[in-house]
Image: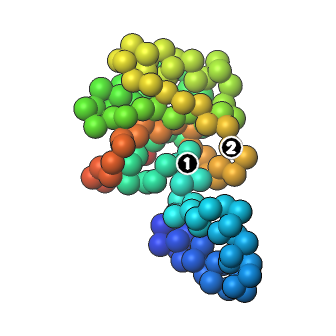
Amino acid sequence: MTTESEHQSDEIGTLSKKSRLEQALTVGVDSVPELKKGEKMLYLGEFKERVIRMLSKKQVASPSLFPEIIEALKDKRTLKMLLNGDLSFKFTDKYIKLAKEVGKPYTTIHNSELKGDTGLVVISDQGVDVEKIDV
């Protein structure tokens, strides 16, 4: 598995290897080079430091709710829940109902650039100090 710093180094290295014209075009087309894009694609578009809890696609497809997600959605630091749009509604429905019950918004992310096996993340709007985010 690739680390955060390796992702960031790859992104910086890729941009710095381009000619000044290519750099200008990249920045012009995309506005500003995206910070930690590789990392964000692993966590449904969010920075890892904002993730409170995470489930894999297989865990989301499991018939039971994970108590760690219930707890995370009730956490005062929680902003919202994100679901991977590749997953069937029959698997995500129980988590959508849970988010509604506890009064937290949710968003389904449809992005072909997503990487990894992340199925669900509960996020904060700021960096949180959670050592173990996966369940």
**Which x, y percent locates residue 15?**
64, 78
Name the kind of residue labelled 1 in the image. Gly
Residue 123, x across and y down, in percent: 40, 40
Question: Considering the image in quadrants, where does the C terminus appear?
Answer: top left
- In the image, what residue type sits under mark 2? Asn
Asked if the residues shown at circle 1 and circle 2 are in contact, with their CB atoms under 8 angstroms apart, the answer is yes
Cα gap from disc 1 to disc 2, whole angstroms: 9 Å
User: In what element is the residue under mark 2?
Assistant: loop
Horizontal relation, residue 109 to residue 127: left or right:
right
User: In percent of the image, x 54 and y 54: which residue is there?
Assistant: 40
Q: How many neighbours does mark 1 have within 10 angstroms: few (below 14), some (14-19), or many (20 or more)?
A: some
Closer to the camera, 92 or 47?
47
Q: To which residue does mark 2 refer? A: 111
Q: Residue at x 73, y 72 (%)?
A: 25
In this view, the residue in front, 53 or 27, is 27
Pointer 2 local density, CA inside 10 Å: few below 14, some 14–19, many at least 20: few
